[in-house]
Amino acid sequence: MPPPAARRWDVVVWGATGYTGRLVAEALVAGAPPGLRWALGGRDAARLERLRRDLGADAGIAVADAHDPASLSVLARGTRVVASTVGPYASHGTPLVAACVEAGTHYADLTGEVAWMRATVDAFHEAARARGARIVHACGFDSVPSDLGLWWLQHQAVARHGRPCHRVVHGFGPMVGGFSGGTVASALALLEAAVADPATRRALADPDVLAPGAAPSPPARPPWWPHYDDDLGAWTAPFFMAGVNRRVARRTRALLGEPWGARFRYRECWRARGWVDAAAMALAHGAAPALLAVGPLRRWAQRRLLPRPGEGPSAAARARGFFRTRLVGRVEGVDAPLVLRLACDLDPGYGATALMLREAALSLALDDLDADGGVLTPAVAFGERLVTRLRRAGMRIDLDDG
């Protein structure tokens, strides 16, 4: 395989003509360092050329087909990093991961599909380690604030108190953001698989699904009803991405050798404005998946209510987006909690996610990372380097004692 220095590109944005792919490409136009060799990737050369003109991008074009292993092999061997935005990943992602592993090429994506992530762990982790390929899932809003935020909070707890937090609660909100047809397609594909496949249902119910071979983790699921949390100082409800985020963070612990102890507990919730807001969120959290699991209702919603692939929030809607999250950690024997606040004045699922994937890809391409190859998490792959990059890019990551 070509050594990294001999490869044509540093980064290829795969799926660049899609809704999210274009946002990642725009983020690279705005924030790529001088001299970065990068390309717009996809299967349609004419559409890629139009995108390049529209963006005024100093970028190349890399043409391949998501289901043609030979073309994906050429793509992977020609670049140091592939940043993939093409979902549902369970349908379109496995051949590209295989090509990257075989070529020793680093890879980052935005997936929240835990069953597919587990499949890549089983199929590719050891081969990726042997070839030095870092395969990093969940490099967007799910699950960078959760995974990297938790790791950074624990890193600071050890630095300040000599030991990690024994429990952490992560409250999301307030936030404003939309969702695209691609995200909807990924979520519905996962729901359909859960309805049809008992193995998928078991994977989605297993808190340790991304940590095969690890000791079972203690339960940390928040109640499904409105609950007042003293650490957060707010009424809370279930958070819709908690199931993904907790499992990614669980893989981080396993890959790091359980540095926070077997008794450590981490949970996520929605930090509501009051009891009524918490009750509404709890009701929506329970009702929406149940209703969409019914085939006719799901198909009707796809036709009438939900955006289709390639569609998403307008630029004006994205400009109104933002997110705030707060992690509160307790260290045994220490009265004051550690509080880590993360904030970004961009739509969480798109503007902020594009920024996160851009910085993950640039870190894989340009930084001297400590992590070995394998199927990794953002915290394991990047650690403090991604904290530094995100801060420089405008995301606020601030720690205080209470």
Image (cartoon, grey):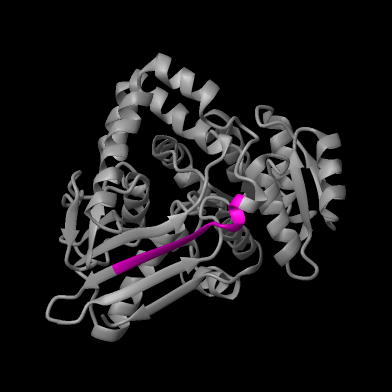
Q: Is residue 224 above or below residue 146?
A: above
Residue 63, by quadrant, is top right
Residue 272, x across and y down, in percent: 30, 56
Residue 91, x across and y down, in percent: 54, 28
Say which of 350 and 369 sits in front: 350
* Image point (74%, 43%), residue name: 41
In the image, is 210 to the left or to the right of 385?
left
In the image, is 100 to the left or to the right of 243?
right
* Image point (72%, 55%), residue name: 26
Q: Start and end of the magenta stretch?
A: 317-327
How many numbered badges does the structure rendering display?
0
On the question of residue 1 being in view, the answer is yes
In the image, farthest residue toward the front: 276
Q: Is residue 312 magenta?
A: no
In the image, is 88 to the left or to the right of 208?
right
Say which of 335 and 231 sits in front: 231
Residue 131, x across and y down, in percent: 56, 51
Q: Is residue 322 magenta?
A: yes
* Image point (56%, 52%), residue name: 133
Give the position of the C terminus as an image quadrant: bottom left
Q: Is residue 399 above or below residue 42?
A: below
On the question of residue 80 being in view, the answer is no
Residue 121, by quadrant, is top left
